[in-house]
Image (tube, rainbow, N blue to C red):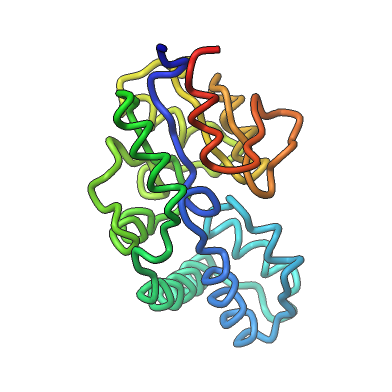
Amino acid sequence: MGMKYKAIIFDLDGVICHTDHYHYLAWKQLADKLGIYFDEIVNNRLRGVSRMDSLEIILERWNGAPLSDEEKVKLADEKNACYKELLNQMSPKDLSREVKDTLEYLRTRGLQLAIGSSSRNARFILSQIGLGDYFDEISDGNNITKSKPDPEVFLMAAKYLKMNPSECLVVEDAKAGVDAAKAAGMDSAAIGDAFGYAQATYSLFTFSKLIQICSVQ
């Protein structure tokens, strides 16, 4: 049985592993320090959004003097330092057996596997969970200038893989990520929060369903 796609590009957070809680704690710490109200509802707006854009969303409730770009960068760096400190707690235990087994199966079938994530910490997270050198290519927040739903992160991944967008399947848990895949001319499989999203080509109730999707119908 042949394969329907030649490559799969995975979002990292919420797909391969879950770091949302660490993001939440780091942003909360920064917001508390600034005296800005922050809760899970505000946090949900930050999903799949770049660090600087996330900061702008949090600063909507800022009542102090306008902040310079320099001050904003400093705040974003402060949040990231706190986040990375929390990420040190991650280990291979944060990689589920289902995800690991599915990735192994897809790899044995000759598929190229890549990461397409807006995170600048993608490589660090992958090394923490035991997937340091696992993926063929990584397109992340360090090589892109635009956040999802802009397709840049996925188009860069396809370019690194030397694949046409039509040969790639994107796996995403955020609607903005599914929209980015569509804009890139790629099929998408939606999992988690994006499950059932009409713009997605497929919905994954569980990660291992990818095996069925990738086999030619």
Where is residue 114 shown, x and y percent of the image? 36, 36
Name the residue: 63% across, 84% down: 34
Q: In the picture provided, is 117 more to the left or to the right than 65?
A: left
- x, y percentage for residue 201? 65, 24
Rendering coords of residue 197 (x, y %)? 74, 35
Residue 45 to residue 42: above or below: above
71 lies above or below 134: below
Residue at the spot 42% in from the left edge and 16% down from the top edge: 3
Q: In which quarter of the image is residue 37?
A: bottom right
Q: Residue at x 43, y 64 (%)?
A: 94
The residue drawn where x is 47% and y is 56% is 17
Vertical comparison of 215 with 142: above or below: above
In the displayed structure, does residue 71 sit left or right of residue 95? right
Q: Where is residue 93 in the image (x, y as percent from the top left)?
A: 39, 66
Asked where in the image residue 43 lies, by quadrant, the reply is: bottom right
Q: Nearer the viewer, residue 137 or 75?
A: 137
